[in-house]
Image (tube, rainbow, N blue to C red):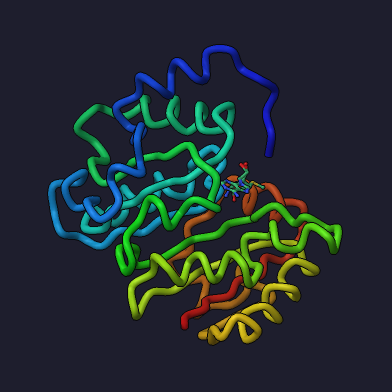
């Protein structure tokens, strides 16, 4: 998702209390940002933030960090966050950054769960390493994830899903669970929180695929 350049985006983000402005300085200290020792879960490529905002409201004992690389997109998440009171959703922060820098922002073992939702497919073979479920990104998640941590990935893109299923063992990871049709899988769909893209594509009739992986 790349929205047109929005001139005020940089200013709004730079002045938002919900955005961590110097995330590299927070490495190993996320408990201080949230003021508690609760687990930290992140969504990489959160887009406009509907999923992570709903997750944070539903799970006040988990701290959430939403990561988005485009300020024009993050702006929408910040604006949505601003529709709630300041004291509401104290367990949610945003970062504007590229996921390639995750290991500079989170300490080894500092993240309990990584959500990847409807990640960009990068269809050309020569761009495979840019896919957020590539072995290169799994190696990056390996550097920040807790020992028992998991990656949860949802998409309607079957080609990307099949690629991800192959990358998991290639990267030395283990597939914990998976489904090709989440919304008709009673067990895996229990408590499912929809993302913006999930709603859009499932309304069009596309089945939603989901996998959970660990090391
Ligand atoms: C297709 S959108 C999906 C948005 C949302 N997760 C959803 O399911 O509705 C993918 C988002 O991931 C972001 N993204 C892609 N690669 C990224 C990266 N390397 N680092 C941070 N964000 C990234 C894109 O800018 C885009 O907003």
Q: Quadrant of residue 160?
A: bottom right
Residue 110 image point, x, y percent: 30, 63
Q: Residue at x 15, y 59 (%)?
A: 37
| Residue 36 left/right relative to 120 | left
Residue 157 image point, x, y percent: 76, 62
Residue 104 image point, x, y percent: 41, 52
| Residue 197 left/right relative to 89 | right
Q: Residue at x 55, y 59 (%)?
A: 116
Front-lying residue, 165 or 29: 29
Vertical relation: 128 (above or below) 18: below
Q: Quadrant of residue 2?
A: top right
Q: Residue at x 49, y 61 (%)?
A: 115
Residue 83 image point, x, y percent: 37, 25
Q: How many marks?
A: 0
If the image is split into quadrants, where does the N terminus sit?
A: top right
Front-lying residue, 210 or 127: 127
| Residue 155 left/right relative to 72 | right
| Residue 207 left/right relative to 103 | right
Q: Residue at x 30, y 58 (%)?
A: 40
């Amino acid at each position: 998702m790349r929205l047109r350049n929005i001139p005020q985006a940089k200013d709004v983000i730079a002045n938002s209390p919900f955005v961590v402005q110097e995330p590299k300085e927070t490495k190993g200290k996320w408990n201080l940002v949230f003021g508690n020792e609760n687990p930290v879960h992140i969504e990489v490529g959160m887009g406009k933030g509907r999923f992570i905002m709903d997750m944070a409201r539903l799970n006040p004992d988990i701290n959430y960090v939403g990561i988005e690389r485009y300020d024009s997109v993050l702006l929408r998440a910040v604006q949505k966050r601003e529709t709630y009171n300041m004291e509401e959703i104290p367990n949610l922060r945003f970062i504007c950054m590229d996921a390639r820098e995750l290991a500079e922002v989170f300490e080894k073992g500092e993240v309990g769960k990584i959500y990847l939702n409807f990640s960009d497919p990068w269809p050309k073979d020569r761009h495979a390493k840019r896919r957020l479920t590539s072995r290169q990104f799994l190696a990056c998640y390996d550097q920040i994830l807790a020992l028992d941590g998991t990656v949860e990935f949802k998409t309607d893109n079957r080609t990307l899903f099949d690629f991800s299923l192959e990358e998991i063992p290639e990267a030395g990871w283990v597939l914990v669970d998976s489904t090709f049709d989440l919304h008709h899988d009673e067990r895996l769909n229990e408590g499912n929180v929809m993302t913006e893209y999930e709603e859009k594509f499932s309304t069009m009739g596309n089945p939603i695929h989901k996998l959970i992986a660990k090391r």
